[in-house]
Amino acid sequence: MRVRKLDKNGDMSFGNGQDDFWRDVPDGPAQCVKTRLMLWTGEWFLDLNEGMPWNTQVLGYYTGTTRDPAIRARILGTQGVKGFTNYSSALDREPRAFSVNCLLDTVYGAIPFIGPI
């Protein structure tokens, strides 16, 4: 699996040849998980059904029972991900922050996935 690296701003990296790619390492599927979680349903013009259902299943007051299953399903649907362990999520309503932590089991090995969403 070959995945173009993203820089600190979330933009694709160019100009460094093969150093701009994750190749057959756990970082590739982990980056794909992050980008799949960042894509909102209806945002991609080629497939309006593709994306994370943020508005209907994650955000809002009455989504406590649908939030984590939706995120878990999206993670498991990512190419190169076999599963995950130690899943936890945290919602902080004051700064309106939500984070997910888990240990991804990829076809290339395990890697921690930690990040705000």
Image (spheres, rainbow, N blue to C red):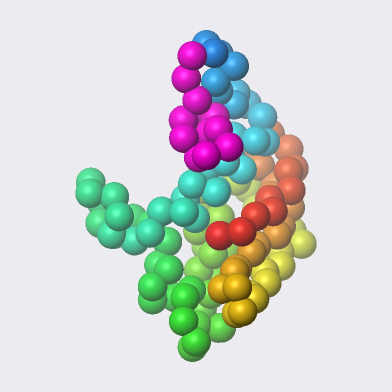
> Front-most of 12 and 64?
12
Image height of 32 relative to 83, above or below: above
Secondary structure predominantly adopted by residues drawn in magenta: loop
Residue 48 rendering spot, x and y as whole percentages: 25, 56
Q: Quadrant of residue 95?
A: bottom right
Quick check: is 95 in the magenta stretch?
A: no
Magenta span contains residue 5: yes
Relative to 45, is 91 on the left or the right?
right
> Residue 17, relative to residue 36: is it above or below?
above
- Name which residue lies at 65% across and 55% down: 115
Which residue lies at the image location 66% right of the left edge and 42% below the top edge? 106
Point out the residue furthest to the left here. Answer: 45
Q: Specify the quadrant of the image occupied by residue 76.
A: bottom right
Give the vertical position of 33 relative to 9 (above or below): below
Question: Residue sitting at 23 percent across and 46 percent down?
Answer: 46
Count of numbered circles in the view = 0
Residue 2 visible from this viewpoint: no
Percent of width and height locating residue 117: 56, 60
Q: Which residues are magenta?
A: 4-15
Which quadrant holds the N terminus?
top right
| Residue 87 appears in the figure | yes
* Residue that appears at 67% across and 36% down: 26
What is the x, y in percent for residue 77?
A: 50, 53
Q: Residue furthest top?
A: 17
Residue 100 to residue 30: above or below = below
